[in-house]
Every structure is written in structure tokens, then in C-alpha cells.
């Protein structure tokens, strides 16, 4: 599912950068850490995890090609990466698909700022940005 040794095609990054839900967050020309998301051995998306100063992790932009959505790949990627990590997510209120993926991965809604999870997978708080 998640594999950080796979090469993420530049075309996929540009495709993601034009998706209205994450446009502006992908930064296809910057050398960010990206983890590929695979389906049947084929790269169909990616995430851009990062660690905040307070040792809490965020998945950053998550993108999955349209033909591979609604297969729980996003929530599985989040769950897999966040295992034994504190987690936080900032999600636009209109991005319902991402909200559902994070909720399915174990995050909880706690308001309008961020979502967080502690290192054992226990939820601290989840909020959505407005």
C-alpha cells in the first residue's frame, strides 16, 4: 500500500496540483518527502507526510487518481503511516472525502482547527479548518 522507495511520476504531481481539493498544497517542483500509494503494484497516488515542531505528524497533501478513489486507499494510507505516531490534519471544510478518510482512519472531529491522534492510535482531537 505505502511505499516510499517508489518513484512518483512528475505528471502525477501536476495532475494532483490541479485537483481543486489540494491545489496549491502539492508543490510539484519542490523536493518534498513523498510516499507513494499503490494499488495492485501500480502507483496511483501519494502522500506528503511531515513532522511538526511538536513531534506531531501530518500527512500533508494526499492524492489518489480519480479511477482509484472510493477503495479506502486514503484511509488505509493514513492508518498505515500514522501507526504509533501522534497525528494531526488540517482539512478544508468542503473536502468531505478527506474528512471521511481521516475519520475512517481513527481521527475524531473536535472543532474547526485540526485533528490529532496520540502515539498509540488513541485520539486526542480532530478539527477541520475553515
Image (spheres, rainbow, N blue to C red):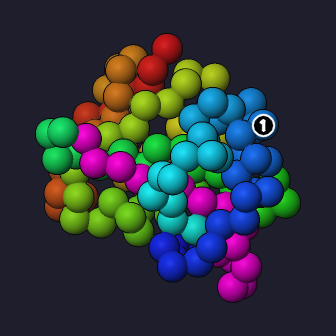
Q: Number of numbered discs present? A: 1
- Where residue 105 appears, x then y in whole percent? 44, 55
Which quarter of the image is occupied by the N terminus?
Answer: bottom right
Residue 85 appears left or right of 96: left
Residue 121 appears left or right of 130: left
Vertical relation: 109 (above or below) 82: above
Q: Residue at x 22, y 65 (%)?
A: 84
Q: Residue at x 33, y 60 (%)?
A: 82
Q: Most prominent secondary structure in the magenta stretch?
A: strand
Identify the element where label 1 is drawn.
loop
Q: Residue at x 73, y 79 (%)?
A: 42
- Where residue 34 appears, x then y in whole percent? 51, 60
The residue carrying pointer 1 sits among few (fewer than 14), some (14 to 19) or many (20 or more) residues within 10 Å by Cα, namely: few
Indicate the quadrant where residue 9 lies: bottom right
Vertical relation: 97 (above or below) 6: above
Q: Is residue 62 magenta?
A: no
- Give the camera-side residue of 102 and 23: 23
- Give the camera-side residue of 27 and 91: 27
Q: Which residue is mark 1?
A: 18
Q: Residue at x 63, y 23 (%)?
A: 94
Of all residues, the one furthest to the bottom in this rendering is 41
- Where residue 76 appears, x then y in whole percent? 51, 65
Vertical relation: 101 (above or below) 35: above
- Where residue 48 appears, x then y in whole percent? 49, 52
Q: Is residue 53 visible?
A: yes
Magenta residues, start to end: 38-52
Q: Is residue 108 visible?
A: no
Of all residues, the one furthest to the right in this rendering is 67
Amino acid at each position: 500500500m505505502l511505499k516510499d522507495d517508489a518513484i512518483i511520476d512528475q505528471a502525477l504531481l501536476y495532475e494532483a496540483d490541479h485537483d481543486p481539493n489540494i491545489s496549491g498544497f502539492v508543490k510539484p517542483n519542490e523536493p518534498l518527502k513523498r510516499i507513494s500509494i499503490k494499488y495492485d503494484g501500480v502507483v496511483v497516488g501519494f502522500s506528503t507526510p511531515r513532522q511538526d515542531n511538536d513531534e506531531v505528524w501530518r500527512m500533508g497533501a494526499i492524492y489518489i487518481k480519480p479511477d482509484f478513489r472510493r477503495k479506502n486507499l486514503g484511509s488505509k494510507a493514513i492508518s498505515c503511516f500514522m501507526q504509533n505516531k501522534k497525528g494531526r490534519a488540517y482539512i478544508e471544510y468542503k473536502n468531505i472525502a478527506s474528512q471521511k478518510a481521516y475519520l475512517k482512519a481513527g481521527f475524531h472531529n473536535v472543532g474547526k482547527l485540526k485533528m490529532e491522534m496520540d502515539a498509540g492510535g488513541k485520539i486526542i482531537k480532530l478539527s477541520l479548518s475553515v
